[in-house]
Amino acid sequence: MHHTRVLVVEAHAEVRAALAQVVERDPSLWLVGLASDFQGALEHAIREQPDVAIVGFKLHGGGPRLVREMRASCPNTRVVAFSVYEDRSAVFEMLQAGAIAYLVKGADAADIVRAVDRATAGESTLSESVTSDVLHELAGHLNRSRISEDVRRRRVAQVRQATQPGAIATVYQPIVELATGRTVGFEALSRFNLEPRQAPAAWFADAASVSLERELERAALESALAGFGRLPPNCFMTVNLGPEAALDDDMTTLLATHAPARTVIELTEHAQVSDYDALHAGLLQLRAHGLRLAIDDAGAGYASLRHILNLNPDIIKVDISLTALVDSDRGSRAMMSALVSFASEMGQLVIAEGIERAETLTALQVVGVHYGQGYLLGRPQPLPAVYGELAPH
């Protein structure tokens, strides 16, 4: 007579003994071991290679973890999960880990033997209450998937609409020499003329969520460059691009045909750079023709400092979170001073963003910042309104 070789793993001694008794009393089953913890159970399983392991969820070391390890080390072992708790999350953790069956309290000896027999044959068994939970969860998952797909389709349509001509209106915020009030450049900023009415950052986040960020960045760049020829010829223009967009052939072609010597790419602190060497190489030709690189949001986090060290930018744009406190916070002032000193040593310019108060402007000049932008110096404006910002302040 063939015996199904069974390993019982359960932390609770009484439950473990009861399960062992069920196995030993059935003539078709053969108990090959008992274990109460993760390590002991895994060693038993590897040594005995049982046909079926009855594994408790509440186990020191983790029931789901043990199931995964057993499935890897004992590929022919089927796992019947057992728990005295009717916990839906426990059910799904064990099933996702690789258990073929799940029984909870209320299962009698016949239920357990039947589950072991079915597991041996590769068939699933779920307790009635577990079946109800699984069906409920599956229905919920399908409903969430449907809703999620509806949201995705709607988002794709909205982002594609935002890439159409006229959907993006570019405004230009002046960058000013602090000592004289002379405008030396403009930052191109996107504004969206369509529903939903939300911040530009939300539009780009939506585009990223449906893998359309490159298309939206290209549309924003095209809109910004459309006004480039109408900016004063002695001023540069900065555009915000992510590292992947900065290496896109269409993007680099656009930049190359619009006076790269007067163009600055702003790489935000929040952009992930996976390969600094590739970014260097991709921008090499444009930078050789005068295009400059700026690190945006410097001081907002560690990533901007890493960008500065790895990319050797021409310009460091200091985040508003640091600029706003430079006149009142000793640490912010020291950090600003350190960035100015570093930039001077490296031959880089510092532009302070978010200047909104006269006290901030004075404090920045004291620590040696020569350039800035912010509402105090000029708000973002469409063309040709930017010409009104050129008068000295």
Image (cartoon, rainbow, N blue to C red):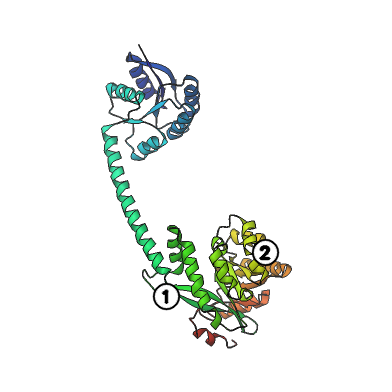
Q: Of the residues under marks 1 and 2, which one precedes in the sequence?
A: 1
* Number of callouts: 2
Q: Residues within 10 Å of mark 2 (few under 14, many from 20)?
A: some
Write down the residue under mark 2: 312
Q: Residues within 10 Å of mark 1 (few under 14, many from 20)?
A: some
Secondary structure type for disc 2: loop
Left/right of residue 285 with respect to residue 53 in the rendered view: right
Residue drawn at point x = 44 percent, y = 62 percent: 207
Q: Quadrant of the N terminus?
A: top left
Residue drawn at point x = 45 percent, y = 27 percent: 75
Could you tell me residue 346's position as x and y percent?
Answer: 72, 67
Could you tell me residue 385's position as x and y percent?
Answer: 49, 85
Note whether 234 is above or below 40 in the view shown. below
In this view, the residue in front, 275 or 89, is: 275
Tag of residue 151: none
Note whether 233 is above or below 297 in the view shown. below
Write down the residue under mark 1: 166
Kind of residue indicated by mark 2: Asn
Residue drawn at point x = 63 percent, y = 66 percent: 331
In this view, the residue in front, 132 or 159, is: 159
Could you tell me residue 264's position as x and y percent?
Answer: 60, 72
The image quarter containing residue 155 is bottom left
Secondary structure type for disc 1: loop
Could you tell me residue 99's position as x and y percent?
Answer: 38, 32
Residue 234 in sight: yes
